[in-house]
Image (spheres, rainbow, N blue to C red):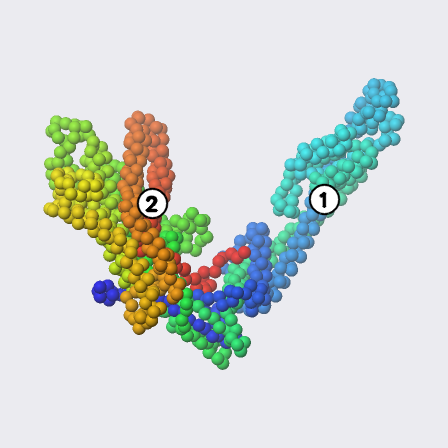
């Protein structure tokens, strides 16, 4: 084991070694020091004021000022977006300004913009009123002229027929009363004209009819122009209306209804000359207002363009300042009130960089007292930090989605770089589909620099972030596709001629007559002659099922071995002796033995039934194996393996809790105080309830925890091995789907001597390949490979109960703040 101890450390094998540090910073250097540390981005501060609310902290006023400036900057950004102005490609250079000057400048700009917006809204409201007045004059005037001519034409008929008795006069309609002579003229027919949104016109008319009990005459016409709604900031279609009625009470009701529906009423004179005069005045004032509005918009856009040229720089500056003051609020004053005390975590390799930055902050702030930086002890566990690059970052994110690694425990991402795309390819194996995936990955890589600087959608951002994962999945899919000899489900003679020929030299249909082997085995992958033969499905089923079990046994063994290296790293030798050793014995005596039999059967060509061997290994271990014997002395070997597996179960269950109890009792009886430093176990590294905390030791909890762990491993060994059969199932499903689309769509359409049917078949085949095989099947295989790593592989050694290292860094600040 000294060989493993002497190997050089890998960056991703375990998380970076962290140290807990304390900073004592003079007040005059505090702001500059925190700013420099934010630029460096490698120190995680601990909140020393977590018992205080945000309003009780020292720099709450500065945080409020920064928040207010952020609000103003968001206001400017909204105004620029509403005006549809583009930010300049090359912002104008501006000398650096401090926070106080920026605050004054932002207040001036906000006041100016608010004033311009208020003036613009008033002008727009006046313009809308004049525009509506103009449309009402045009439409309502037409209603009045037509009504007058209609009155003169029918006056005589009304005199003869409608007014022979006085009772009818009381029940006559309003329009008829206006047209009749005598008493009706004394009542007086009136009208109200106005304009309303088109969407409300039906409800409006119905309400008027009900309020006046039908004693009104309603006329409407669509407005010729759209009116800008100042609230919705969009153009609204409106309708001009005229309501004829009689009586002051009806007038009051109608005006209230107009007010409730948001209808604007305008007076229209009955005199044609006066109406023309008012119309001319309205048109003149509209032209003046249009010119004024255009000048105001140009002035406002000029101001917004000037602000937009500096908006990004100002936003970054304010965001950084707010982050600095938020971090300063996490620090405490010392007793003299002249220094700030901070604590936090940093990687050991970063200590020289932090010290250099702090020295520079002291020099730049002209402080007479330097910043004290020293390492101290901490009670809590350090955070987990992995240094990744653009290639390994996506694989680390896949592991972190399950749980952040415990500090310094083995990192599954190192092995997932290869195992994850490989298991995906076992399910997705087709080198035609693999080439399609490869082309997509190469497009993302070719546009990497351009896409990394753009704001992408959620789906595209996911694809771009996993571009190297997709690249490896594509390469492994091509490899497994060559193993399966499938190119869109079609086999090819890539590596030579087939090893099989017809059983009868005169036969012409090998699919029905059968094949015999006449030359050496096909050098690489599956022989193309298996495709379409009667033995294709049984052969591929057996091959892929046994191959899936082999992959599962190998990967789960790797997980158990990693648990050994975890225990060795943390010096927890109890875990090595009473967890790792019995787990290896139990797992390999059963499933390792099954994997060995599979390999021997492949190598020897035996016809032994492995189902029978494994079942009767438990039911009748002493019976004669007969034709199922693959090894010399196989029966006593199976009995020995079965007994070893049975012994391994209590080995996992009982010794560890008893030894922990004994060590706890001896510790408090004063027997092992001198041996604690050299004990063969690290009590603090025990997981869960088995962790010892001085007098807090509950033996029943330790036993229950160990029992759950042991039973979970024993039962999980069976279920996890069976779970790897999904490799076989999905691979078979992918192959059969490809075959169906190729034979039942493409070949069937190609059998017709019609170009349109052929093109339709080709289009359906391309659509099915792209959306079902390349999208849905890719997602399915991706998720199943994810499950195999998270559950079957990582549960053997990975606790995942750590917390991520989140340093104070300007680079990680969110782009948008609430």
> In the rendering, at what x and y percent does residue 556 appear?
27, 51
Q: Residue tagged by mark 2? A: 784
Label located before the other in sequence (1 or 2) = 1
406 left or right, relative to 530: right
In this view, the residue in front, 414 or 813, is: 414
Which image quarter holds the N terminus?
A: bottom left
419 left or right, relative to 150: left
At horizontal 25% and vertical 59% (from top left) the residue drawn is: 577
- Say if 541 sits above or below 22 in the image: above
Report crowding for label 1: few under 14, some 14 to 19, many 20 or more residues within 10 A (C-alpha): many
Residue 90, disc: none
Q: Residue tagged by mark 1? A: 130
Q: Secondary structure at mark 2?
A: helix
At horizontal 72% and vertical 40% (from top left) the residue drawn is: 260
> In the rendering, at what x and y percent does residue 7 appear?
25, 65
> In the rendering, at what x and y percent does residue 543 appear?
22, 41
In this view, the residue in front, 67 or 237, is: 67
Residue 570: in sight, yes or no?
Answer: no
At horizontal 44% and vertical 49% (from top left) the residue drawn is: 458
Residue 189: in sight, yes or no?
Answer: yes
564 left or right, relative to 346: left
């Amino acid at each position: 084991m000294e060989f493993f101890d002497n190997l050089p450390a890998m960056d991703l094998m375990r998380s970076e070694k962290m140290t807990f540090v304390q900073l004592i910073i003079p007040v005059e250097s505090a702001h500059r020091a925190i700013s420099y540390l934010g630029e460096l981005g490698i120190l995680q501060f601990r909140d020393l004021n977590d018992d205080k609310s945000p309003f009780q902290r020292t720099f709450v006023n500065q945080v409020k000022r920064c928040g207010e400036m952020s609000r103003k900057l968001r206001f400017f950004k909204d105004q620029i977006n509403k005006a549809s102005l583009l930010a300049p490609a090359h912002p104008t250079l501006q000398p650096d300004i401090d926070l106080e000057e920026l605050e004054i400048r932002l207040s001036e700009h906000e006041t100016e913009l608010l004033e311009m917006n208020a003036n613009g809204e008033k002008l727009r409201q006046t313009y809308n009123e004049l525009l509506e007045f103009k449309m009402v004059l045009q439409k309502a005037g037409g209603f009045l002229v037509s009504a007058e001519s209609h009155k003169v034409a029918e006056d005589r008929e009304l005199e003869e027929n409608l007014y022979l008795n006085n009772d009818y006069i009381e029940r006559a309609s309003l329009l008829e009363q206006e047209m009749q002579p005598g008493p009706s003229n004394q009542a007086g027919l009136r009208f109200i004209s106005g304009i309303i949104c088109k969407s409300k016109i039906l409800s409006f008319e119905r309400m008027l009819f009900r309020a006046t009990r039908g004693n009104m005459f309603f006329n409407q016409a669509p407005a010729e122009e759209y009116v800008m709604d100042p609230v919705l900031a969009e153009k609204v279609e409106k309708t001009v209306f005229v309501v004829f009625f009689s009586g002051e009470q009806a007038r009051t009701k109608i005006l209230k209804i107009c007010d409730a529906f948001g209808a604007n009423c305008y007076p229209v004179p009955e005199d044609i000359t006066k109406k023309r005069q008012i119309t001319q005045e309205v048109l003149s004032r509209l032209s003046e207002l249009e010119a004024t509005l255009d000048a105001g918009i140009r002035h406002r856009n000029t101001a917004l363009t000037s602000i937009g040229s500096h908006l990004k720089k100002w936003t970054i500056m304010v965001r950084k300042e707010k982050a600095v003051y938020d971090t300063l609020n996490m620090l405490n004053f010392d007793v003299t009130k002249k220094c700030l005390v901070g604590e936090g975590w940093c990687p050991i390799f970063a200590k020289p960089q932090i010290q250099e930055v702090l020295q520079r902050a002291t020099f730049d702030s002209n402080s007479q007292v330097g910043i004290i930086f020293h390492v101290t002890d901490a009670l809590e566990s350090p955070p987990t930090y992995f240094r990744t690059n653009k290639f390994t970052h996506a694989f680390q994110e896949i592991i972190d989605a399950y749980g952040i690694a415990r500090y310094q425990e083995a990192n599954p991402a190192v092995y997932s770089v290869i195992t994850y795309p490989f298991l995906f390819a076992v399910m997705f194996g087709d080198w035609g589909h693999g080439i399609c995936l490869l082309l997509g990955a190469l497009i993302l890589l070719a546009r990497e620099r351009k896409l990394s600087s753009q704001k992408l959608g959620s789906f595209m951002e996911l694809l771009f972030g996993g571009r190297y994962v997709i690249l490896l999945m594509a390469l492994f899919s091509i490899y497994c596709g060559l193993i399966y000899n499938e190119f869109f489900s079609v086999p090819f003679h890539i590596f030579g001629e087939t090893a099989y020929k017809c059983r009868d030299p005169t036969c012409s249909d090998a699919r029905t007559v059968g094949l015999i082997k006449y030359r050496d085995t096909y050098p690489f992958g599956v022989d193309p002659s298996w495709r379409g033969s009667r033995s294709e499905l049984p052969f591929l089923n057996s091959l892929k099922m046994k191959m899936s079990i082999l992959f599962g046994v190998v990967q789960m063994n790797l997980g158990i071995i990693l648990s050994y290296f975890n225990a060795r790293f943390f010096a927890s030798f109890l875990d090595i002796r009473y967890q790792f050793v019995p787990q290896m014995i139990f797992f390999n005596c059963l499933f390792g033995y099954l994997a060995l039999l599979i390999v021997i059967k492949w190598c020897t060509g035996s016809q032994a039934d492995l189902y029978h061997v494994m079942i009767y290994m438990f039911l009748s271990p002493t019976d004669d194996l007969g034709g199922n014997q693959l090894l010399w002395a196989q029966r006593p070997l199976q009995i020995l393996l079965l007994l070893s597996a049975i012994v391994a179960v209590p080995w996992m269950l009982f010794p560890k809790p008893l030894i922990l109890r004994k060590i706890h009792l001896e510790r408090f009886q004063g027997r092992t105080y001198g041996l604690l430093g050299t004990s063969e176990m690290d009590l603090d590294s025990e997981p869960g309830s088995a962790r010892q905390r001085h007098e807090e030791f509950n033996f029943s909890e330790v036993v229950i925890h160990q029992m759950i762990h042991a039973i979970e491993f024993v039962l999980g060994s069976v279920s996890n091995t069976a779970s790897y059969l999904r490799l076989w199932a999905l691979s078979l499903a992918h192959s059969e789907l490809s075959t169906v689309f190729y034979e039942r769509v493409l070949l069937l359409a190609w059998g017709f001597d019609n170009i349109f049917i052929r093109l339709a078949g080709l289009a359906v085949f391309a659509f099915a390949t792209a959306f079902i095989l390349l999208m849905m099947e890719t997602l399915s295989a991706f998720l199943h490979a994810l499950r195999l790593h998270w559950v079957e592989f990582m549960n053997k050694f990975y606790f995942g109960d750590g917390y991520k290292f989140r340093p104070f860094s300007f680079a990680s600040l969110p782009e948008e703040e609430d």
